[in-house]
Image (cartoon, helix red, strand yellow):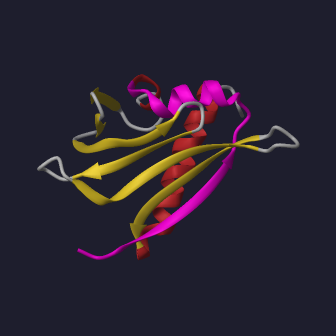
Amino acid sequence: MDQKVRYEIEFPINSSPQLLYQYISTPSGLSEWFADNVNSRGEFFTFIWNDSEEKARLASKKSGEKVKFKWIDENNKDTEYFFELHILVDELTKDVSLMVVDFADKDEVDEATQLWENQISDLKHLIGSV
């Protein structure tokens, strides 16, 4: 398996951090913009897109600030890959943005970035931040 590369993208979002946190930390919030369906059992989340399914463990969260999901393998063991959604608030302007940290194969970073842009666009429409 090829080594994936880490990348970060920041998206300005017109929203309160509290509202945004509901959409990035709960199965119901995530299923409205991130995946077709999201289920959780304790710390384990199942993300469903069309006919594919990926499992992740909620590795860490800080209320109102960030969530980190670690992808797990078929034996429910953590892989080295994760994605993190981090709400940033500028101290001076109070502008809110969402920092996405993810991994992709070197030759697929542009494609993965495009996918995030589309998903974040859906999120912005949901919360009226367009």
Quadrant location of the C terminus in the rendered image: top right
Closest to the observer: 113 or 8? 8
Q: Looking at this view, name the residue that lies furthest to the right.
A: 92
Spot occupied by residue 110 in the image (x, y as percentages of width and height): 51, 67
Residue 64 versus residue 95 in the image, above or below = above
Residue 78 versus residue 126 in the image, above or below = below
> Which residue is pictured at 71% across the width and 30% down the height?
15
Spot occupied by residue 107 in the image (x, y as percentages of width and height): 42, 75
Q: Is residue 99 magenta?
A: no
Residue 20 versus residue 59 in the image, above or below = above
Q: How many marks?
A: 0
Closest to the observer: 129 or 57? 57
For the record, the magenta segment spans: 1-27
Quarter occupied by residue 50:
top left
Q: Is residue 8 found left or right of 88 in the rendered image?
A: left
Q: Is residue 3 magenta?
A: yes
Spot occupied by residue 71 in the image (x, y as percentages of width and height): 30, 51
Residue 42 versus residue 118 in the image, above or below = above
Q: Is residue 97 found left or right of 116 in the rendered image?
A: right
